[in-house]
Image (cartoon, coloured by chain):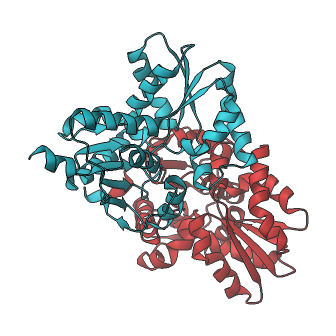
Chain colours: A red, B cyan
Amino acid sequence: MNTEDQREKPIGVFDSGVGGLTVVAEIIRQLPGENIVYFGDVGRTPYGGRSKEQIIKFTRQDVNFMREHKVKFVVAACNTVSAAALDTVKSDYETEILGVITPGAKAAVGATHNKRVGIIGTVATISSDSYAREIQKLSADIKVFSLACPLFVPLVEEGYIDKEATRLIAEDYLQTLIDVDIDTLVLGCTHYPLLKHVIASVMGKGVKLIDSAEATAHELAEILSHNNLMRPWTSDTSHKYYVSDVPDRFSQVAGQFLGHNIPNITRVDITRY
Amino acid sequence: MNTEDQREKPIGVFDSGVGGLTVVAEIIRQLPGENIVYFGDVGRTPYGGRSKEQIIKFTRQDVNFMREHKVKFVVAACNTVSAAALDTVKSDYETEILGVITPGAKAAVGATHNKRVGIIGTVATISSDSYAREIQKLSADIKVFSLACPLFVPLVEEGYIDKEATRLIAEDYLQTLIDVDIDTLVLGCTHYPLLKHVIASVMGKGVKLIDSAEATAHELAEILSHNNLMRPWTSDTSHKYYVSDVPDRFSQVAGQFLGHNIPNITRVDITRY
């Protein structure tokens, strides 16, 4: 296949649910010419509390689905998948798969001055220790402090963005990171950028927040550009959305993530992949 | 099989996860002689946001698992299952299946004086409208007000029982029920009894709370006693716990529900049932 045909192919983005849409929003912002196929595994969400073995199985099915859609590149827009499954699954496929951990880790290493970095995410992401490992691969003298914040995802999905209850929970969770004097905090879950304001105000001005969605879209842009695979910006881009259960709730929450409604969402049976 | 053998058989209790343990706790309290087999579908939890079709499929597998354990009676200790699947699934089985909706509805009808009853539960339970239908079957002139409270389950699972954030969220959610002057409120989700204190204090003294776990164990006791199937209370009762993913998190949260730790939890592959 020639490069031009290759360029036309879509980017495949998948997530355990709706959270990966923060990555889609960043791809649309940073790479406005790209066609996108999105899959949200809402029928089996959340991955965050499940075993490594199950997460690996689900990830394989998600990637198989993307390959059927002849994507040029797969983005695992899910911290849990990136942390728990990608190392195992990547080598089975020819198509390149980019997770959100490496870009987030790189951005954190570039941002910290006092070499003390915090990571927040789901239980699975945090207990995998992937961010810490990735950061220490890049700079061994950085100290990493990790913390699971399991209520942040349901709060975002309920639209509890600017509420006093959310602030109290954030204060509760984040105090241990304030105590250890970090200057950089990685939002290691795709839902968390929606809580950026409350997290920033609890952490205080001295702490820089790293949005892994933004970092991932940036890394993707660099890879595509380097390989001459970026699709030029024309008006006729296509963005397709697939989910693994009824789309009602996905469609409700999606608006918060993308800033606009999604007109067509297709339901697929992911267990057959 | 004679009645004595039949009596010895365990009660099968299943739930989408850990919540059904409130029903187990009540069965142990009200029927201390019974052997119990519990299955928590932690690998596919929560059911609450899924489609009716998926919930029905999962329920069939859960009941099949129970039948393999030769239970004398199945309790669907999950409001979502009771609301969305039980009517469809019940007729496929010889074994009797008791849900939590009918007992909760009966108790509410018995408790209300002003004939204004509130129901709180998951999105699936509330949108199924099952409690309202069941209550109006029993007493057509009762007005029912239903409300989904999606954050209550994650709050309980995070141990946010006596926190200010939980009170603020409860105040937020419950205001619409206070406004319509109910005198009875059904806790239509097995997690909610753990928030009884905060819900009671937000609703005020004039509102009676109906705990569907308590009502279900009570109904079960009546049925068993009526059919001469109650197992006498001896010291050697057996309680067995099964889950569909790694038991770590189940075991952590279970303590909050049962008031004691569970020593042995067995993992099973529920998709093969």
Q: Judge whether B3 appears above or below B200 on screen.
A: below
Query: Can residue B114 be seen at all in this image of the molecule?
Result: yes
Q: Nearer the viewer, residue A19 or B74?
A: B74
Query: Can residue A10 be seen at all in this image of the molecule?
Result: no
Q: Judge whether A186 appears above or below A135 on screen.
A: above
| Name of the residue lying farthest toward the top | B141
Where is residue B120 shown, x and y percent of the image?
55, 32
Q: Nearer the viewer, residue B101 or A15?
A: B101
| Name of the residue lying farthest toward the right | A205
Rendered image quadrant of residue A246: top left
Name the side, left or right, on which B68 lies relative to A112. left
Residue drawn at 57 percent across, 54 percent down: B157
- The quadrant of the picture occupied by the C terminus of chain B is bottom left
Name the side, left or right, on which B120 lies relative to B217. right
Where is residue A157 shown, x and y percent of the image?
63, 46
Where is residue A261 shown, x and y percent of the image?
62, 39
Where is residue B92 shown, x and y percent of the image?
20, 38
Name the side, left or right, on which A242 lies relative to B2. right
| Name of the residue lying farthest toward the left | B1
Q: Judge whether A102 appears above or below A202 on screen.
A: below
Residue drawn at 45 percent across, 52 percent down: B45
